[in-house]
Structures are given as structure tokens and as C-alpha cells.
């Protein structure tokens, strides 16, 4: 340890059980990761798997995400599940734009991730053509365990994300690449 670093003594009354020192980043990350409110954008079969994920057997409420929000302003996790036609691309983007920062996105299943089996003129070949995606969940359809695994990955990202990341040049450049 550098000789310039000094460990200060805690002030009177702030010692003993019930007190600990941490950083603001870690506390905020912990709170965010345990209270992600999903906005289910379900257009086809993968949405059924999400319904199972919400049910009592898989019980997404174990992770603080049992409150689906159909209002983008009260959601911080956009879950796109199903085939997205090209004409729906602007709608997905508008929903994303209406969500407040910090916001995260999961592409659930092959269709949302890459167009899946629908390599046709009318289907968007992955939602990352219109919005940035944080986690891709493979499968056609993915099982509820896989959707939960995707949620776990988002929770890890939220937990470890510095609170100033959204103000970084890198993040702004990412949004600009999507004309956002
Ligand atoms: S990935 Fe498969 S299961 Fe999911 S919406 Fe597409 S076709 Fe349906």
C-alpha cells in the first residue's frame, strides 16, 4: 500500500455490527440488479415461454422482476420475444426511446436475435438492426431456464455497471450509431 494512503478511523457511533463501508457504484448496482422491471415485447411463440417464466414454477419474482411493465417509462429491461417484422422495427425503437436510462435489452430467441428461420424480405434480421442489445438468448424457443439465464446475465451487467457509464463517450457513440 502506498505510504500516502491513510486509513481513517470511523467517527464515533459508526462502528460495530450493522455498519460497513462500500462504494456508491456497488450499492446502486446491487439495488438495480434486484429490481429490474421488464417490459415484455412479445409478438409470437417465444412470448409463451416468457409466460411460463413468469409463472409459479419458474417464478421470476425470486429476482425482483415479477412486475411486468407495459409502460416504457416504468420499465428498465426491454425483453423482445418473437418475430419482428420490418414494419415493427420503428415501433420497437420508439418503445426503447421512451424508456428512461439506465435501460437494458434482451433479445429472447432466434427471431429477435437474428430473424431466426424467417430469412425473408419482411422480417427484421435481428433487433440489433434498430436498437442496441445487451444479451442474446438463443433457442427456438428458448426454455424458461434460458430466459432466466439471460436475466441473470443482465443482472450481472447492471450490478457491475459504473453509475457514470451512460454519460461516457463510448455509450454516446453506441447510441449515435443507432441515430439515437
Ligand atoms: S425463435 Fe422460434 S419460438 Fe421464438 S418466436 Fe421465433 S419461431 Fe417462435
Image (cartoon, rainbow, N blue to C red):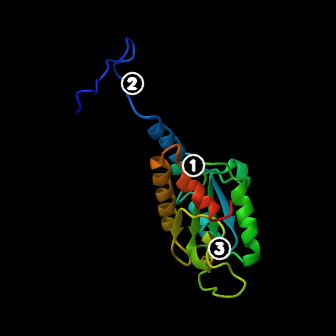
Q: Position of residue 43 (x, y in %)?
A: 70, 71
The residue lying furthest to the bottom in this view is 120
The residue lying furthest to the top in this view is 12
Which callout, 1 or 3, points to the residue nearer the camera? Answer: 1
Label 1: element kind? helix
Which callout, 1 or 2, points to the residue nearer the camera? Answer: 1
The residue wearing badge 1 is: 166
In this orientation, which residue lies closer to the viewer: 51 or 16?
16
Marks 1 and 3, the one that precedes in the sequence? 3
Q: For mark 3, does the 10 Å Cα neighbourhood hold few (<14), some (14 to 19), or many (20 or more) residues?
A: many
Residue drawn at x 66%, y 61% is 40
Query: Is residue 69 in view from this perspective?
Result: yes
Q: Determine the quadrant in which ligand 1 lies.
A: bottom right
Q: CA distance from mark 1 to mark 2?
A: 30 Å
Q: Is residue 173 rendered to the left or right of residue 23?
A: right
Residue drawn at x 60%, y 49% is 102
On-image quarter of the N terminus: top left
The residue wearing badge 2 is: 19
Q: CA distance from mark 2 to mark 3?
A: 46 Å
Q: Which mark is residue 54?
A: none
Q: CA distance from mark 1 to mark 3?
A: 28 Å
Q: Position of residue 107 (x, y in %)?
A: 58, 68
On-image quarter of the C terminus: bottom right
Q: Position of residue 44 (x, y in %)?
A: 68, 74
Q: Pointer 2 and pointer 3: residues touching (CB < 8 Å)?
A: no
Residue drawn at x 27%, y 27% is 4
**Number of numbered discs:** 3
Q: For mark 2, does the 10 Å Cα neighbourhood hold few (<14), some (14 to 19), or many (20 or more) residues?
A: few
The residue wearing badge 3 is: 82
Label 2: element kind? loop
Residue drawn at x 77%, y 75% is 87
Amino acid at each position: 500500500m502506498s505510504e500516502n494512503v491513510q486509513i481513517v478511523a470511523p467517527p464515533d457511533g459508526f462502528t460495530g455490527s450493522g455498519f460497513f463501508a462500500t462504494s456508491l457504484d456497488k450499492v446502486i448496482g446491487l439495488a438495480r440488479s434486484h429490481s429490474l422491471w421488464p417490459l415484455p415485447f412479445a409478438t409470437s411463440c417465444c412470448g409463451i415461454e416468457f409466460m411460463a417464466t413468469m409463472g409459479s414454477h419458474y417464478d421470476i419474482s425470486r429476482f425482483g422482476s415479477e412486475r411486468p411493465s407495459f409502460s416504457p417509462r416504468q420499465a428498465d429491461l426491454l425483453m423482445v420475444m418473437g418475430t419482428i417484422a420490418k414494419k415493427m422495427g420503428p415501433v420497437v425503437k420508439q418503445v426503447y426511446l421512451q424508456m428512461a436510462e439506465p435501460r437494458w435489452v434482451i433479445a429472447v430467441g432466434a427471431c429477435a436475435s437474428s430473424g431466426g428461420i424467417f430469412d425473408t424480405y419482411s422480417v427484421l434480421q435481428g433487433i440489433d438492426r434498430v436498437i442496441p442489445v445487451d444479451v442474446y438468448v438463443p433457442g427456438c424457443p428458448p426454455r424458461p431456464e434460458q430466459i432466466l439465464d439471460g436475466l441473470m446475465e443482465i443482472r450481472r451487467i447492471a450490478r457491475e455497471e459504473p453509475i457514470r457509464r451512460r454519460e461516457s463517450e463510448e455509450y454516446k457513440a453506441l447510441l449515435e450509431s443507432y441515430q439515437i
